[in-house]
Amino acid sequence: MELASINLVVKDADAALKTYLKLFGTNNVAEVIKLKGLRDDSEIVDGYWLKTSPLCLAIYTPRGSTGRMGEFLQKYGEGIHHIQLHMGQDEFERTYYQFKSDGWPVSQPTYVGKFSEAIFWLEETGEQKVPVKFATKAYRTLKMWQDTIYHDTPQKFEVLNITEQIIRPRVDLKTPVVSVKDFETQQRVWGSILSRPVHLRHAGEREPVDDKRGNRFIANMYHFKNRSKISVYHALNEEGSIRRTLARRGKDAMYYDMIIHFQRDKAHEIWRQWEKAGFAMVDPKPLLNRHGGNGNYFFFIHPISNHGVVCEFVSLWNFPEDETSETHIIFDWTDTKVYTVSPDFNE
């Protein structure tokens, strides 16, 4: 199982595509696939699949107001609607049957004909309280074929030829953040869904994190081999924006924001580029996080600029694959051209 994408619902997919190409830079988007008439058991949507790294970004506009994304857009407006997890077909089928046997609210599987892919949804009525989509590339007949809806969908798809060049420093889309009320329950639920342990390898491992936005929270993290992770935040203070947003929506959990990493020595340059491009920067300059001594820069772009999505930016760093290591972070120097000691000495 791998975390594959963060999926947005927007009013105008074409406008959102322009926004996110301007945000990421065309050099950080390997490919853009335009989808027309993509259908599942709930609705028909149009939109785009942006191949960013390590997570892809999907942008969808529903044709109606009655499906999962259509109802979300009507009720809450634009924003992050769901995440998508990819797995092999055998694991996909085992997961579906296991969820169904355990009483989880799963949708009827759908076969996406033109891509030879199968999907099912873990509905937001489940204990996780947010929609999660599972997908596989089929290499044989599905075992649950009698329960599967077969659609020759999407109606049309094409790889766009992006002629405009927008060059940004390297950025990596790595983390969707889920904010929750019932932290103890959500630890158990997400561990069960993802079949992996939780890690508290964060500045707030022993004490709450202060995001300098009035939020104090504890973070659980679930890591994937492609360097991505899911973060589950439990905000401790009612007056902070995380808890206020949950209260305003009347929800116990929601996708709160997405985290994008960048090279540390590019912090001020990329901040100035985004400000010049017209994005609503929350702060007058990047903030330096001295809490816990990690020395990372971080800042936010207001959701008014990003079709309802809070975008959080943090200096590029990776957790080591060996989670038992005493090393808390490793640095990625691939985008660094100026140095006095060559990073090659560490290889």
Image (cartoon, rainbow, N blue to C red):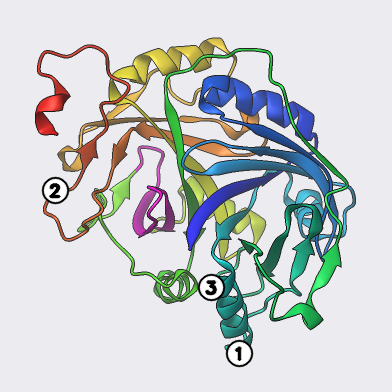
Foreground of the two, 125 or 340: 340
Q: Which residues are magenta?
A: 211-234
Spot occupied by residue 209 in the image (x, y as percentages of width and height): 30, 49
Label 2 residue SS: loop
What's the residue type where badge 2 is placed? Answer: Thr
Query: What residue sits 66% from the left and 64% below the top?
Result: 138
The disc label shown at residue 101, or none: 1
Q: Are marks 2 and 3 in contact (CB under 8 Å)?
A: no
Find the distance from the CA under tag 3 to the CA under tag 1.
Answer: 15 Å
- Can residue 214 be found in the magenta stretch? yes
Is 193 on the left or on the right of 334, as rendered? right
* Mark 2, residue position: 327
> Looking at the picture, which amino acid does disc 1 mark?
Ser
- How packed is label 1: few (under 14 Cα within 10 Å), some, or many (20 or more)? few
| Residue 311 visible at all | yes
**In the rendered structure, does residue 61 fall within the stretch colored magenta?**
no
